[in-house]
Amino acid sequence: MKKIVPAMASLRSLVKLTNSVAISTRTMASHPLAGLLGKLNHVAIATPDLKKSSDFYKNLGAKVSEAVPQKEHGVYTVFVELPNSKIELLHPFGEKSPIQAFLNKNKDGGMHHICIEVRDINEAVSAVKDKGIRTLGEKPKIGAHGKPVMFLHPKDCGGVLIELEQE
């Protein structure tokens, strides 16, 4: 009988754990923003040397795009394709580049932002504003992929600049 008691206690612990997981899953599904965020589109990295950064990923066997000037955003972009996402390399373009300001503070470069896809950019912007999350701009702009995007203030997002992009 003594061997059965510990087994029953373990079974009870497993049932409790399963119930708590089920409860937390239901709680997340009923969250007002559930279903708002989609998959990770890319991680953006600011770099002082675009060629060196591009070559780094090419040497690892990644498919790396050519540099594309994004005059309206003040950046050159290079996309590194990965099996499940992308890396966006950012380099300053022009005098007023926001990436130059970032590199002035971070001489070696570093992670600039993450981009998360959303089903409906206007619905997403409205929802985050309703939650008190500040946006960097009044309305979405067309981003590097030719789709509407909106950046969220890093002070409202755990210190991370987040880009929302229309799927």
Image: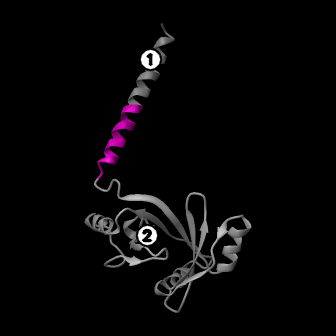
Q: Quadrant of the C terminus?
A: bottom left
Give the farthest residue toward the top. Answer: 1
* SS assignment at label 2: strand
Left or right of 103 in this view: 59: right
Provide residue 102's location: percent of width, then percent of height.
Answer: 52, 80
Q: Badge 1 is on which residue?
A: 8
In the image, the segment drawn in magenta is: 18-31
Provide residue 81's location: percent of width, then percent of height.
Answer: 60, 65
Provide residue 34's location: percent of width, then percent of height.
Answer: 33, 53
Q: Main secondary structure of the magenta part?
A: helix
Left or right of 68 in this view: 49: right
Give the farthest residue toward the left. Answer: 130
Which of these two is toward me, 126 or 152? 126
Left or right of 13 in this view: 130: left
For the point 36% across and 32% down, the residue is 19
For the point 36% across and 67% down, the residue is 156
Which of these two is toward me, 157 or 125? 125
In this rendering, the answer to whether 126 lies above or below 146 is above
Disc sitting over residue 163 in the figure: 2
Badge nearest the viewer, 2 or 1: 2
* SS assignment at label 1: helix
Give the farthest residue toward the bottom. Answer: 95
Provide residue 26's location: percent of width, then percent of height.
Answer: 32, 42
Taking the magenta stretch, the answer to whether it contains residue 149 is: no
